[in-house]
Image (cartoon, grey):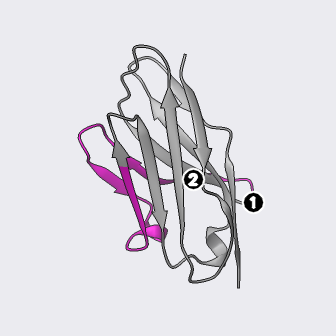
Amino acid sequence: QVRLVESGGGSVQAGESLRLSCAASGSGLIINAMGWYRRTAGNQRELVAAITRGGTRNYADSVKGRFTISRDNVKNTVYLQMNSLKPEDAAVYYCNANTVSTNYWGQGTQVTVSS
């Protein structure tokens, strides 16, 4: 069993930054890809960014150049540095982690961006 604990959400003004963190815990843990998704007010869930264990990154077009995903494989933690935030980035952000057999989700953290 894997538990994902997210932190770092909050309310900011447009143009400001936030950093999200997600720590995975569990015995015998080997995590492959980790990533961040968000659910917008329209209730659509979309991939924001993902990173493999080897460090290959993938970003949604809407966040390229503004967001950076990174991970610490020793700490089983993934980070999302969000710069130049826009009102359309406002959403609940969910951490995701994949083991060889299971897909896990965090509880979500709210990001609010005011114009």
Please rate how many residues cluster around mark 2, counting C-alpha atoms within 10 Å: few if below 14, some from 14 to 19, many from 20.
some
Q: Which residue is mark 2?
A: 46
The C terminus sits in image quarter: bottom right
Mark 1, secondary structure of its residue = loop
The N terminus sits in image quarter: top right
Whether residue 89 is situated above or below residue 27 in the rendered picture = below
Give coordinates of residue 24: x percent, y percent: 50, 32
Give coordinates of residue 99: x percent, y percent: 41, 23
Give coordinates of residue 110: x percent, y percent: 71, 56
Tag 1: amino acid: Gly
Mark 2, secondary structure of its residue = strand
Q: Residue at x 36, y 22 (%)?
A: 30
Whether residue 12 is situated above or below residue 21 in the rendered picture = below
Magenta span has 28?
A: no
Q: Residue at x 67, y 51 (%)?
A: 109
The boundaries of the magenta stretch are 42-70
Q: How many marks?
A: 2
Please tell me in which quadrant of the rendered image residue 11 appears. Answer: bottom right
Please rate how many residues cluster around mark 1, counting C-alpha atoms within 10 Å: few if below 14, some from 14 to 19, many from 20.
few
The residue most toward the front is 75
Residue 2: which numbered mark, if any? Answer: none
Circles 2, 1 touching at the beta carbon (< 8 Å) = no
Compared across the picture, whether 50 is left or right of 91 comes to left
Spatial CA span between label 2 and label 1: 11 Å
Q: Which residue is mark 1?
A: 42
Q: Residue at x 51, y 79 (%)?
A: 84
Q: Residue at x 39, y 35 (%)?
A: 75
Tag 2: amino acid: Glu
Compared across the picture, whether 50 is left or right of 56 comes to right
Compared across the picture, whether 51 is left or right of 108 comes to left
